[in-house]
Amino acid sequence: MTCNPNWPEILHELRPGEEASGRPDLTSKVFNMKLNALFQDLLQNGVLGTAVADIHVVEWQKRGLPHGHILIILCSHNKPCDSSDYDRIVCAKLPDKSTHPKLYNIVTSRKLHGPCGALHPSCACMLNGACNKGYPKTFQPQTKDSTGNYPTYRQRDDGRTFTHPT
């Protein structure tokens, strides 16, 4: 989980000319509030299943905002075992711009990797002329388990694409 400097709770409290990264008191308080709400959903409300163990750490990024790494161990009958279990939990698709414009704008402005590639060779993720994160990803009809690695999530080709403006 990463602190968003554009959360309304932060923006509302900034004075003219202030930036969120210059207010660690404010960003840490709002981040902690939202982190606790996430823990409530994950651990008490069990949105992913019953948790039997959890651990987390909060760090501060170089740009001055907190982010958290969270590990949750689910009970054996809630652990994802195959591609249909992953597909129940993870959704990797662009929202429909005409029916969900606000969500589309959030995803395309905050939740996509890039821009990188041939048009942006100096991007931090570029290594030997290619993105070291494996972007752009290819469409996948179903999730594939990559033993020992992260799964390759289902990304159906529904005709929706997005290209970062240059």
Image (tube, rainbow, N blue to C red):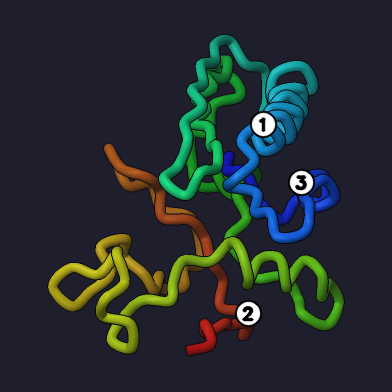
Query: In this rendering, is residue 134 above or below 24?
Result: below
Q: Which mark is residue 25?
A: 1
What is the distance, in whole Å, between disc 2 and disc 1 at their CAs? 43 Å
What is the distance, in whole Å, between disc 3 and disc 1 at their CAs? 10 Å
Q: Residues within 10 Å of mark 2 (few under 14, many from 20)?
A: few
Q: Residues within 10 Å of mark 1 (few under 14, many from 20)?
A: few
Q: Residues within 10 Å of mark 3 (few under 14, many from 20)?
A: many
Q: Which mark is residue 10?
A: 3
**Which is more toward the observer, 60 or 141?**
60
Which residue shows up at 62% across the image and 55% down it? Answer: 91
Question: Residue 28 location, x and y as percent?
Answer: 65, 31
Sequence-wise first label, 3 or 2: 3
> Looking at the picture, which amino acid does disc 3 mark?
Ile
Query: In this rendering, is residue 18 above or below 26?
Result: below
**Secondary-structure class at tag 1:** helix
> Looking at the picture, which amino acid does disc 2 mark?
Asp
